[in-house]
Image (tube, grey):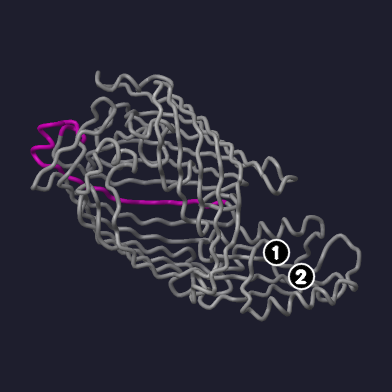
Amino acid sequence: MIVSTFCIFTYLALEQQALAQSNIVKTDSFYIKDVLIECHQKTIDRIILREMAYKKGDRIAKANIDSVLQKEANKIFNTRLFVVVDVYPIPVKGDTINLLVSLVERWYLYPIPIFELADRNFNEWWKQRNRDMSRVNYGLRLTQENVRGRNETLKLLVQLGFVERYGIEYKIPYINRDQTTGLVFKIDFAQNKNLAYRTDDNKLSFLRSEDVLRERFWTSLGFSKRKAFYNTHHFIAGFDYQSISDSIYALNPDYLNNQGRSQRYFYLNYIFNHDSRDMATYPLNGSYLNFSVAQKGLSNFDDLHQFEIKFVGAKFFHLSKSTASMPLFFATSVRGFISFPSYRPYSELQGFGYRGDFVRGYELYVVDGQHFGIWKNTLRWRLFSIRANLRKFMPLEQFSTLPIAAYLKTYSDVGYIKNDFVAESNKRLTNTMLWGKGIGLDVLIYNSLLWRFEYSRNRQGEWGFFFGFEADF
C-alpha cells in the first residue's frame, strides 16, 4: 500500500531498516519493542491498537511476517476510519523490532444530499416504473463519524419525497475500559403517501394518494459484546408501531396483523456476527457468519407474535496466489430464513427481492414466503488494482489517494422459498426451485464505492442486464 510521503516516521523507518539488516540474528521470532502510529490527527491510539493482535512486548514469528502484518492492517482498515493502512516491521537491534502503523484518515463529516430511488433496486425503477422521477427520495443525511476520535458515529436523517422519514442514531463502539462493550440508540419516524399494499404476479402493486397511507414509528436500544477480534454479540430491544389508512385496509385487510388498522409490538433480537473478511465492502479472502434470532411480541400488549431465525454464511478464497498479474478469487455463500407461525401479515412478509435476499436474474421480482434458502457462487478475475496519486489535483489528504480495481466475474445462484398461503397470481415463482447465472463486471473505487454490471439468465429463460451498488453478498 502507498504511505503518505508527508509522514516523517516512514522516511526514518525505511532508512533505519536499511541500516539494521546486517544486525538481525537468525532466530524464529522478533521481540516487539514498541508499536508506533503515524499520520493520524483525530483517532486516538487505543481505538487503533484495539484491532491489533500484537502489542508492545509480544513476540512475532519471522515466518510469513508480511502476510501476518497485512492481516493486522486489514483489521484496522475494516474500522472504516482510514483510506490507507500499512503495518511495517522496523528493525531496532538484533531480534528486536518496532511495528510502524502508517495511516491516512478518512474525511469524517458527511453532509450528504439524498437523491435516491425509493424502489427496491435500480433495475425495478428503470424497467417496471418507467424511470418515474416522482419515485425518488430527497433530503439530507448528516453523518459525523469518529466522534471524539473514538470511532463513535452520529447520524441525522431528514428525508422527503416518495417516503418521508426522520431519524437519529448514535453509536458508541466501546463504553468500558476493556473496549469490549458497545451501545447504539436509534429512533425513526416515516410516513408514506405511496405504498406497496399487495404482491401480484410477483411484482409490487402500489397505491398513490394525496393523503398519508401509512405512518410508522420505531426505536431500539442495542448492546454489543466484542471480546475477540472477529466475533461480536448484539443484544437489541425495540418497539415498532405502524398504522394504515382506510384505503389500504380496503385493498388488503391482511396488511397488518389480525386485520387491524394499527399494529404495535415490542421485540428482542440476538445477533452473532463473525467477520474475518480482508475487506468488508468487497471481500476477497476470509469468512463471514451472521446468525440472528428475534421474537416480535413479548406480551398480551403486543398485536404481533412472530419468531424468526435468519443466517448468512460466506467464504472467500484466493485461488491463484502464485499468479499475481491475473489472480482468481472464488466466493460462496448460504443464507436462510425461518419464521413461525406460518401466517404473517403482509407488512412482515418479505422473502426474495429485498436487501441481499435474492437470486441473481430475478431482480425484477418479489417472491413472498415464510421460509427460504439461497446458495450463491461467484468466480472473480481481477483485471487491475491500482492506487492513483492525486496530490497534484487534490489538496485534501483524505482524498489524495484513489484506490480503484476492476473484476470480471461469472456466477450461479439457486434458491427456494416456501409460502403456505400463496395467492394464485404468485404461484409461478413460489414453492419451486429458482436459479440464475450470468457474467458481470465489478468496479471498486476508494475501497467503498462499488458498481456492479451484470448480464443474467434465470430458470424461466429470461435474460436481462442489471446494475447495482452493493456487493453480491
Question: x, y percentage for residue 64?
Answer: 78, 55
Where residue 204 is drawn, which disc sits there?
none
Element carrying mark 1: loop
Give the residue displayed 36% in from the left and 40% down from the top.
295
Asked if the magenta segment contains residue 461, the reply would be: no
Q: Residues within 10 Å of mark 1 (few under 14, many from 20)?
A: some
Give the side of residue 324 with respect to residue 334, left or right.
right
Give the residue displayed 25% in from the left and 18% down from the top.
424
Pointer 2 and pointer 1: residues touching (CB < 8 Å)? yes
Give the residue displayed 49% in from the left and 69% down from the top.
399
Asked if the magenta segment contains residue 254, the reply would be: yes
Q: Against 231, is 357 above or below?
A: above
Give the side of residue 168 with respect to residue 42, left or right.
left
Stretch of the chain drawn in magenta: 231-259
Where residue 54 is drawn, which disc sits there?
1
Where residue 32 is drawn, which disc sits there?
2
